Amino acid sequence: MDAMVVSGAIACLGLSAAGSAFGTGFAASSAVGAWKKCYAANKPAPFILLGLVGAPITQTLYGMILMFIMLGKTGVAGAGVPLLILGIFAGLGVGLSALFQGRAAAAACDAQAETGQGLTNYFGALGIVETVAIFTMVFTIIALGKIG
């Protein structure tokens, strides 16, 4: 059963990190394109786009936090299947938040570079998407407290 607990913990981290990879990849591609447009127009390239690019990386940290808590459940009788299921679905929730946050960040990169306006609104929208990951992490921690 410990193998299932470890598998659930690794699934949670892996799916969270995969979402971060997709999200940062989408945002980075958009930032590079936005910078290219700025350079072509002889406009300063906004460095702040890196903040938008990095927004989806925090979901990997949430997955890591959950992984460590789940690994603390090794040796708990009957924890294997519940933790495997919990790890998969928590990882999906956190990872999908990162993916879609990256898609929103990509649009924000383009808009910020083109207009130079609205940065606070863009980060606000990204924060709302981030909240899905935070809720998923918190509710998963609550569920983990019921195991064992």
Image (cartoon, helix red, strand yellow):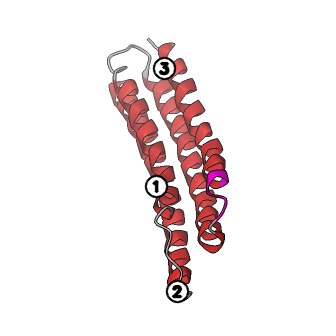
Q: Is residue 55 above or below residue 139?
A: below
Q: Is residue 107 magenta?
A: no
Image quadrant for the C terminus? top left
Labels 2 and 1 touching (C-beta < 8 A): no
- The first of marks 2 and 3 along the sequence is 2
Residue at point 50%, 51% (across, down): 56
How many numbered discs sit on the rendered protein? Answer: 3
Disc marking residue 54: 1
- The first of marks 2 and 1 along the sequence is 2
**Tag 2 residue:** 42
Marks 2 and 1: which is nearer the front? 2
Residue at point 45%, 57% (across, down): 21
Q: Looking at the picture, how far across and down is residue 104, in whole percent?
A: 63, 58
Say what secondary structure mark 2 lies in.
loop
Most foreground residue, 132 or 85: 132
Magenta span covers which residues?
117-121
Q: Main secondary structure of the magenta part?
A: helix
Label 2 to label 3: alpha-carbon separation:
54 Å
Residue at point 65%, 68% (across, down): 111
Disc marking residue 144: 3
Q: Looking at the picture, how far across and down is residue 74, in whole percent?
A: 33, 21
Most foreground residue, 79 or 96: 96
Q: Left or right? Give the position of 35 relative to 122.
A: left
Label 1 to label 3: alpha-carbon separation:
29 Å
Q: Looking at the picture, how far across and down is residue 144, in whole percent?
A: 48, 20
Q: Quadrant of residue 26?
A: bottom right
Query: Mark 1 belongs to which amino acid?
Result: Gly
Marks 1 and 3: which is nearer the front? 1
Circle 1 crowding by C-alpha within 10 Å: few under 14, some 14–19, many from 20 = some
